[in-house]
Amino acid sequence: MKTGKKSMTLEKKKSLTGWGFLLPATLLICWMNFYPMIQAFILSLKSGMGVNLSFSGFSNYTRILSDSTFKQCLFNTIFYLIIQVPVMLVLALALASMLNNKDLRFKGVFRTAIFLPCATSLVSYSMIFRSMFANDGLVNTILKGFGIAPVGWFANAWTARLIIVLALIWRWTGYNMVFYLAGLQNIEYSVYEAARIDGAGPVQSFFKITVPLLKPTILMTTIMSTNGTLQLFDESMNLTSGGPGKSTMSLSHYIYSTSFVQSPRFGYAAAMSIIILVMVAVLAVIQMKVGDKR
């Protein structure tokens, strides 16, 4: 006797089960990520002080174009990005290649030592760098020993930016090195031995074997580092306090000051946050298009 109802196929049951497992995570991502983004965009269309806000269209975005402090902070952030990210990633890749040598003794100690800065408290390491580069700090003491006049590292905009770049490289190189080490350990030593038998030197092996096989990892660390640098806050806040003046202030630091230090202008701060979001998204898409040729 036919009931007239069609039974669900096995493939459809599997598909529905999969969507059932994905649904909680999808809802959480929408709630935790996309809902705040939408709220931030709506907030960016309002202007006023504190909670007294009213819709003003795109006036906050128009104002950004003539804000000299925003332009200064944008320049600082891009400066940190184009100097720090390439240097840090190249250094991390070189260190990972050296520490992947199976004949190297105490490589576990070296790996731990290079990774340790990443586990250091942000405030602690900022205080250490501040004391090292103070007028009577370690660096100036060494310079005096060589007969060189002390440098006011935090009094000059370019030297203060240089200290932030050095601090970022010191802290995050080991973190990226771990990703490269994980990728390198998936490459069989026999590949390198075969290349050596064919007459390839260390440099040729690095550029012909290591770099191509690590390309997905390099792409991932580039996107992560770019994203992190565009949202740079801690070093600008704790190391230089954005000074001298606002010459080392990052965009995130300026957004924080606009929201909580100066008269609270949440709408304007939200508009700047949307600008950073767009920059991160555009750079990530470009890097993925350039780096992923599959």
Image (spheres, rainbow, N blue to C red):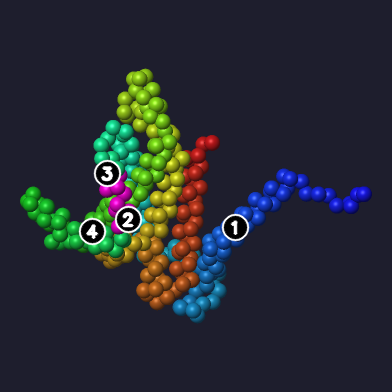
Seen at 45% across and 64% down, the residue is 272
Q: Which residue is mark 1?
A: 26
> Marks 4 and 1: which is nearer the front?
1
Looking at numbered disc 1 in the image, what kind of residue is underneath it? Thr
| Vertical relation: 214 (above or below) 118 | above
Query: How far, Cα to Cα, is label 1 from label 2?
Result: 31 Å
> Marks 3 and 4: which is nearer the front?
3
Residue 107 seen in the figure: yes
Query: How far, Cα to Cα, is label 2 from label 3?
Result: 15 Å
Q: Taken as a whole, is the magenta stretch helix, strand or loop?
A: helix
In this figure, what is the number of numbered marks?
4
Q: Quadrant of residue 96?
A: top left
Q: Report whether 238 appears left or right of 275.
A: left
The local secondary structure at tag 2 comes to helix
Q: Which residue is mark 2?
A: 119
> Marks 1 and 3: which is nearer the front?
3
The local secondary structure at tag 4 comes to helix
Residue furthest right in the image: 1
Residue 86 seen in the figure: no
Q: Position of residue 114 (x, y in %)?
A: 29, 47
Q: Which residue is mark 3?
A: 110
Among the two numbered marks 1 and 2 on one chain, the one whose residue lies closer to the N terminus: 1
Seen at 35% across and 31% down, the residue is 206
Q: Which residue is mark 4?
A: 129
Q: Are marks 3 and 4 in contact (CB under 8 Å)?
A: no
Query: How far, Cα to Cα, is label 4 from label 2?
Result: 16 Å
Please provide the residue range marked out in magenta.
111-120
Looking at numbered disc 4 in the image, what kind of residue is underneath it? Phe
